[in-house]
Image (spheres, helix red, strand yellow):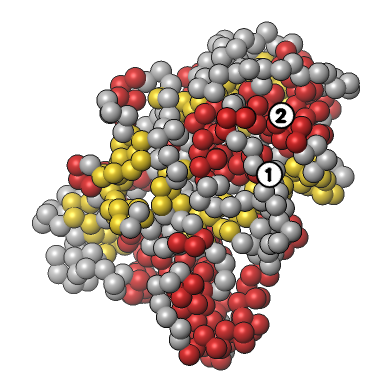
Amino acid sequence: MNQWSEDLISVELARTLDGLFQQRVRRSPERTAYRHYDRQSREWRDHSWREMGDMVARWQAVLAGENLRRGDRVALTLRNSPEWVAFDQASLGMGLVVVPLYTDDRPDNIAYILQDAAVKLLLVQDGGRWKRLAEAIPVEGALQRVLIQDATDADAALMSADARVRRVDDLLPAAVPKIPPRNGDPHALASIVYTSGTTGRPKGVMLSHHNMLSIAHASITVIDCYQEDRFLSFLPLSHTLERTAGYYLPIMTGSTVAYSRSIGQLAEDLTLLRPTVLIAVPRIFERVYGRITDQMRQRPLLPRLLFRAAVRVGWSRFERAQQRAGLRPSMLLWPLLDRLVASKVTARLGGRLRIAVSGGAPLSAEIAQLFIGLGIPILQGYGLTETSPVVSVNPLEDNDPASVGVPLRGVEVRTGDDDELLVRGPGVMLGYWNNHAATAKMIDSDGWLHTGDQARIENNHIYITGRIKDILVLSNGEKVPPGDMELAIALDPLVSQVMVLGEGRPYLSALVVLEADHWPALAQDCGLDPLARDSLRHPRVVAAVMQRIKAMLKQFPGYAKVRRVTLQLEPWTVENGLLTPTLKVKRAQVLKRNHQAINAMYQEGPTQGKR
């Protein structure tokens, strides 16, 4: 770390997000800004800040020819890439408002967003993507131009069929035009980010330049970042956590961002690109945890014992480093356990990881303990799209994985009625686009944003204790937080997805999507054919799964018991409308899709215990 250096650009100097980028180009022109995989040459390519500045200038020439005015909305649905950055920066530098879209979102949802935001220009990845979208997007409306990034000769028919469609390569100038200086308003609207919409239509969160700049800067007052850091980017840039912390923040620090090829190739990219900083959602850590624990179950006794010892001793070392525990004799075994166990796991993540931030949803304590015990420094954070998005994060030197960290500098937090967490600060959104009623409901007259999450605050750390709207109230008056139970059940490698139910009912039940890879073995253990449709409902299979759920919930109070279960193999996905683009379960849609099975679980009564 001695040769690592800081080169931070202040919020005051940057003023706007495009101002931040231009400052970085001037300050570090030849340093590597981005690394990405070129699918045509099948090679990894580096782009310097100077090259990125040239790319932005060319894009501004394209946008200048589209009859766009300051404040007009432009949208993009691209995979993470230097082109995403160039389009965003060119748009911001012309005073346009960027609307990021998820590449895997449903066409009808994208069509709604384009209409709601009156988007005038849309950049899409390729002709195939536009072909799917075009069926849902009417010809009449605000959209006046569609640009295809990776166009091929086969896309000529799309352009002849719709005069709005053009190829990016046909419009980008060969020469690099000069970008005129801009003295933009820091508090002007920079982006409208549509929330995932777990219920109903998504709402457009209006974020200013200052909103995102201030949160990026406040984040590095809690966690140090350096020019020599390498971020691995795989969360979509349309996700506000990735955009603020994995895109704008590295510009502020002068760090390099490497773009993973895909989630499916993430494991390979980790070892190849060897990042120092990783920003992820819990689902990524859950998948790795599931693979590790599943592999351990199949190993002989000695490797299993060594693995458990490594996690246990590593956790003790972590607690001592955090000054929450003293020295233990077992810590003398760490060099051996590190060599035999921990170093092999950290090598799979590239071997250089010094920070792994988890945000977007709660991270299970068991998962955090395993990774931290093996030497992978997971820092849990918290935020909302409406707060740009980070509210809090754990510092390396004061890391309590049970909490979501300490508030960022300049961010105020307190608890209100029903222990609801309230937030006030520079990252709080300007409001919801075209929705004053929802804005007034979210932000009170004193500027406090109501998160809907229940929390307690101790020693400056925030502990999320529940979700006001998600609490299940059983017919006997017992209140159950389903999220905690779902996290616990999902730790079983057999379980891919789970939803705990019971609002107004006499007992709890669950919908469980089984991991397809594990289902054949379970069916065969029960003496059943995994291909037979009725096997999922067979009493022996149901009993086996219920027993496993019971084991995962043994630490919960007596009333928090799942009495019935419905098993499924078809996963809940974005494509079938049961997940948001940020991979959150749309509870209302899952309930609607499974209403007959749910009613059956309560008509037939519990399968174990008493009501």
Q: Are marks 1 and 2 in contact (CB under 8 Å)?
A: no
Quadrant for residue 549, please give it.
bottom left
In x, y percent, where is residue 426? 44, 33
Mark with earlier residue (1, 2): 1
Amino acid at dot 2: Gln
Amino acid at dot 1: Asp
**Crowd band around label 1 with a 10 angstrom C-alpha radius: few (<14), some (14–19), many (20+):** some
Is 253 positioned to the left or the right of 475 in the image?
A: right
The residue carrying mark 2 is 22
Disc 1 versus disc 2: distance between alpha carbons? 15 Å
Q: Secondary structure at mark 2?
A: helix
Viewer-side residue, 334 vs 522:
334
Quadrant where the C terminus is found in the figure = bottom left
In x, y percent, where is residue 28? 77, 39
Q: Residue at x 18, y 51 (%)?
A: 473
Quadrant where the N terminus is found in the figure = bottom right
In x, y percent, where is residue 196? 45, 37
Q: Secondary structure at mark 1?
A: loop
Q: Residue at x 26, y 45 (%)?
A: 415
Label number found at residue 7:
1
The vertical placement of 235 against 182, above or below, is below
The vertical placement of 593 against 307, above or below, is above
The vertical placement of 240 against 208, above or below, is below
Viewer-side residue, 125 vs 557:
557
Q: From where the camera sits, is residue 270 visible?
A: no
Viewer-side residue, 206 vs 26:
26
Q: Residue at x 57, y 71 (%)?
A: 375
In x, y percent, where is residue 486? 36, 59
